[in-house]
Amino acid sequence: MIQLKRAYETASPNDGLRILVERLWPRGVSKQNARIDLWLKDLAPSTELRKWYGHDPDLWPEFRKRYWAELGDLGDFLVLLKYVIKERKVTFVFAASDEERNSAVALKEFLEG
């Protein structure tokens, strides 16, 4: 089971394994308060894709398509991640203010699809 949570929300024991899925550390969040168990930068969209998207809601469908293509290149890494997700509760931690259209949402959809 994958849960999603903004980095600015308080960590909870119910979060399980907390994985930061951002290429950059969230602004204004201390590492102590974030309580991140793993920081998997390689799961985040490329810098080029992130800048292209710019959190423009009109670009969301195309962003997902391009991001999923990038994820497809991760191969064995994704197999391992899917195994971890089946074995324990996982929370993907993200920084975006749009809670419906961000890379953590797209990543969750990719892994669960």
Image (cartoon, rainbow, N blue to C red):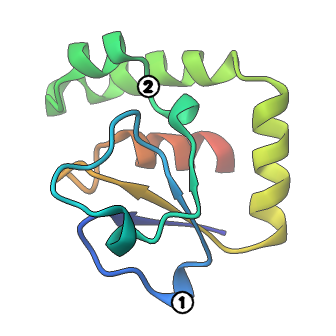
Q: Quadrant of the N terminus?
A: bottom right
- Tell me residue 93's x, y (percent): 42, 59
Which of 32/8 is in front?
32
Write down the quadrant of residue 49 in the picture: top left
On screen, residue 90 versus residue 36, left or right, reads right
Q: Is 75 situated left or right of 98 in this image?
A: right
Is residue 27 at all visible to an observer of this figure?
yes
Q: Residue at x 85, y 29 (%)?
A: 76
Q: Is residue 104 above or below residue 57?
A: below
34 lies above or below 95: below
Res. 113 in view:
no
Vertical relation: 39 (above or below) 31? above
Mark 2 lies on residue: 45
Q: Which residue is mark 1?
A: 13
Q: Quadrant of residue 74?
A: top right
Q: Amino acid at mark 1?
A: Pro
Instruction: Relative to 81, say whether 37 is above or below.
Output: below
Residue 23 or residue 4, whichever sits in front? 23
Q: Quadrant of residue 60?
A: top left
Residue 48, position as x, y percentages in the image:
33, 10
